[in-house]
Image (tube, rainbow, N blue to C red):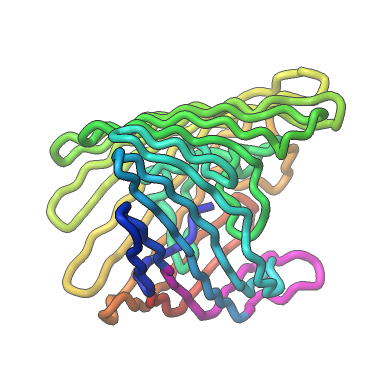
Amino acid sequence: MKKILIASTALTMLAGAASAEVTIAGSGYFGLQYYSKPAAGMKKTVLYSRLQFDVNASKTTDSGLTFHGKVRIRSQQDMGTAGATPINAGQVGVTAGPLDVTVGNVSDAIDALTLYWDSELGISGSGGETLNYINQGNGFNGYSSQGGGDNGVLVTYTVGTLVVRASYESHNNLTATKGEAAVSVAYKTGPLSFELAYVDNQHSAAVAQFGYQGYTGIVEYALGNSNVGLAYGSSKDTTPANVKEKSINTVTLYGNTKFGATTVQAFVSNTSVPAPGGVAMTNFRKVTYGLGGSYDLGSGAAMVGSVRTTNTKGGTYADLGVTFSF
């Protein structure tokens, strides 16, 4: 899932006839995280913190091509992470006019979207997503902030407010596994914004790898200091033996409004899991909802909190803390 990152430039270097730039963007947060149904042996309430740096580099040649690269350094402590501080696998690419090609540890065409993540609440962002989270398969591939990624390519073409993306990720070039292909389109006109996307993560009998197919559509309307959005997603697994499961369908209504230094967010989401599609879950909750908010402390800092239900009956998640950038 997407994490909060408010980037701030910390270092800029210019050299040579061709323009070159290196920047370091830093962010962090700390607070409390609560989950009513933690894993065995885990506490319900834990301290929650992250420190992150993004190192971005770019160089524009005399011919107008811009070459770029990025690595991320992250230390995190929460219910599922013990505070390791790795440098993740990097990405490199080139931009020529409206076309950008990036390879390595990249987002796929869905992970790179914006509206798809707008229903999320809280310090690190979660809740209301329409794909990926209750299937048996791998779901769609995202950018790996603390790992090696899946070694892929993301192609982005931008004309005005139209952004078209296509991606392929190889699952680290292993011959026994199959790759993932995805496409997405984003467009904005006046107060309306739209996103459409499709992903096909192939199955493999050789390593008992489930496949995953899904599509999603989001429309969002902006009115003054408020936004309201409607998202739909449908996804299904393909077993390693090439048996297609029934689709899991999710509809999410979300919105946010800002008054003064305060922003309030909310979502309600309905998910249908027709048997035998998806994971057999006797305690599955179809309708989830959440409420979140933030208070701007100035200079890139904010007090942030949220509470939401999960797809597990009796499951409640909450967090409260401070985010900042430097």
Residue at image location 42% in from the left, 30% down from the top: 184
- Residue 11 relative to residue 74: left or right: left
Q: Is residue 275 visible?
A: no
- Residue 265 relative to residue 182: left or right: left
User: Picture coordinates of residue 198 (x, y %)?
Assistant: 49, 27
Residue at image location 51% in from the left, 46% down from the top: 92
Image quadrant where residue 235 sits:
top right
Please tell me which residue lies in front, 127 or 290.
127
User: Picture coordinates of residue 135 (x, y %)?
Assistant: 67, 37
| Residue 294, above or below 68 | below
Please tell me which residue lies in front, 278 or 109.
109
Residue 34, magenta (yes or no): yes
- Looking at the rendered image, the quarter that the C terminus falls into is bottom left
Bounds of the magenta span?
24-46
- Residue 258 relative to residue 148: left or right: left
Q: Taken as a whole, is the magenta stretch helix, strand or loop?
A: strand
User: Picture coordinates of residue 7 (x, y %)?
Assistant: 37, 66
Residue at image location 59% in from the left, 73% down from the top: 34
Image quadrant where residue 231 sits:
top left
| Residue 161, above or below 224 | above
